[in-house]
Image: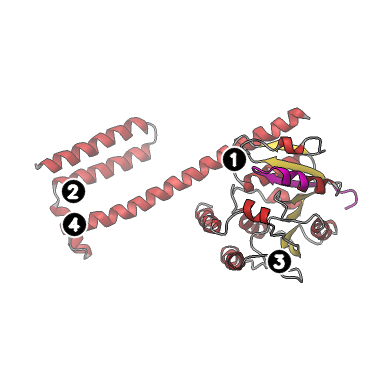
């Protein structure tokens, strides 16, 4: 195993552990996390696989395929975060609105 | 609808003397005034001292859409029959309120929307750029909602109780004007555009939003559609 493989695998495992500790109760998240990390570790250990898949898909180089997939994943994550932000904003709005109207009622 | 219970909602953010002028002129109409202070830095209450109005205060700044919805919720709770939205920066004219109210009081429609491009005289002092942005926005609204109106982002509108109950605004910022269109289409509300005059004064231009903000509105709408 080369140095970069050790570095990447330990980084992935560390991140996975961190997430696992924080997202205790959502089984779907844990499963998704497990699949992603397992995939990452496998591709790090056997980089030839990405080349094989890339050639099948007509991309050429494995590293390029990984790069393209990452872009798609990032876009997805950003959208997910946006939707969560909007939900949070709506919840805050509800709370402030309720408080505002209650305050006005008290003053009357 | 004789003796209708009419509320005017005035959202205000960091307004000062102009708010007092606007609110004072609104009081002459005899309708109930609700000023929603959208978390202004110093608060607007010193500028409203002694005026017979109801002041609601958001603890933090949420945006004009949120302030209008808070006003709506409050007015509905108080049994409002008709709710009017009126900007606080002096760009609207009090005289236009009667034009907005007439079709609602005669039960001709549920909601009236002010349009600056319907009046016989062209909007004065409107910049070429603003004009262009507004017309682009009209067609974007058409794409989003299927309703082609003559004006896109006019803050002046009036609605009856039924419409106010259906139009629950979730867009906190400026996209509320388009959200109103989504909602009135979705809830099959009867609407009508009426000519109003927008005064582009130095003050309202400086206080109002920049035309560049339309880009922000566009993305808010896109996300709104995406996460509906």
Instruction: Find disc 1 in the rendering and name its residue.
Output: B61
Q: Which mark is residue A62?
A: 4
Work out how far the residue at label 3 is from the one at label 2, CA to CA, in angstroms.
65 Å
Residue in view at x 14 percent, y 42 percent: A5
Q: Is residue A51 above or below residue A46?
A: below
Q: Position of residue B104 (x, y in %)?
A: 81, 57
- Labels 4 and 3 within one chain: no
Q: Is residue A31 above or below residue B115?
A: above
Residue in view at x 65 percent, y 32 percent: A99
Q: Residues within 10 Å of mark 3 (few under 14, many from 20)?
A: few
- Check the residue under mark 3 and report the chain it is in: B
Q: Position of residue B180 (x, y in %)?
A: 65, 55
Work out how far the residue at label 4 is from the one at label 3, CA to CA, in angstroms.
61 Å
Residue in view at x 70 percent, y 30 percent: A103
Work out how far the residue at label 4 is from the one at label 1, CA to CA, in angstroms.
49 Å
Instruction: Find disc 3 in the rendering and name its residue.
Output: B124
Disc 3, SS: loop
- Check the residue under mark 1 and report the chain it is in: B
Residue in view at x 28 percent, y 57 percent: A68
| 4 or 1: mark nearer the eye | 1
Disc 1, SS: loop
Q: Which residues are magenta?
A: B1-21
- Say if residue B6 shows up in the picture: no
| 3 or 2: mark nearer the eye | 3
Where, by quadrant of the figure, is residue B49 drawn? top right
Question: N-terminal of the two: label 2 or label 4?
Answer: 2
Q: Which mark is residue A43?
A: 2
B48 or B156: nearer the viewer = B48
- Check the residue under mark 2 and report the chain it is in: A
- Labels 4 and 1 within one chain: no
Q: Residues within 10 Å of mark 2 (few under 14, many from 20)?
A: some
């Amino acid at each position: 195993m080369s140095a970069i493989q050790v570095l990447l695998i330990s980084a992935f495992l560390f991140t996975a552990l961190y997430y696992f500790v924080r997202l205790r109760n959502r089984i779907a998240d844990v499963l998704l996390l497990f699949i992603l990390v397992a995939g990452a570790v496998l591709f790090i250990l056997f980089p030839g696989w990405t080349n094989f898949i890339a050639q099948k898909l007509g991309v050429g180089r494995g590293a390029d395929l990984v790069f393209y997939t990452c872009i798609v994943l990032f876009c997805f994550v950003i959208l997910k975060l946006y939707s969560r932000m909007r939900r949070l904003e709506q919840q805050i709005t509800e709370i402030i609105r309720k408080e505002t109207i209650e305050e006005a009622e008290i003053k009357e | 609808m004789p003796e209708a219970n009419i509320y005017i909602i005035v959202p205000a953010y960091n307004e000062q003397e102009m708010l007092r002028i606007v609110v004072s002129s609104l009081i002459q109409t005899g309708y109930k005034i609700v000023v929603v202070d959208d978390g202004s830095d110093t608060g607007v209450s010193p500028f409203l001292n002694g005026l017979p109005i109801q002041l609601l205060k958001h603890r933090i700044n949420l945006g004009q859409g949120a302030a209008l919805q808070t006003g709506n919720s409050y007015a509905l709770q108080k049994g409002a029959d008709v709710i009017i939205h009126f900007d606080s920066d002096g760009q609207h004219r009090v005289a236009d309120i009667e034009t907005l109210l007439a079709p609602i009081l005669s039960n001709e429609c549920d909601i009236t929307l002010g349009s600056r491009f319907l009046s016989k005289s062209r909007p004065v002092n409107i910049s070429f750029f603003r004009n262009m942005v507004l017309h682009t926005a009209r067609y974007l609204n058409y794409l989003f909602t299927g309703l082609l109106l003559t004006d896109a982002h006019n803050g002046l509108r009036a609605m009856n109780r039924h419409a106010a109950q259906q139009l629950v605004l979730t867009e906190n910022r400026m996209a509320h004007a388009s959200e109103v269109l989504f909602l009135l289409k979705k809830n099959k509300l009867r609407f009508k555009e009426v000519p109003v005059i927008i005064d582009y004064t130095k003050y309202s231009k400086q206080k109002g939003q920049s035309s560049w903000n339309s880009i922000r509105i566009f993305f808010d709408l896109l996300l709104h559609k995406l996460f509906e």
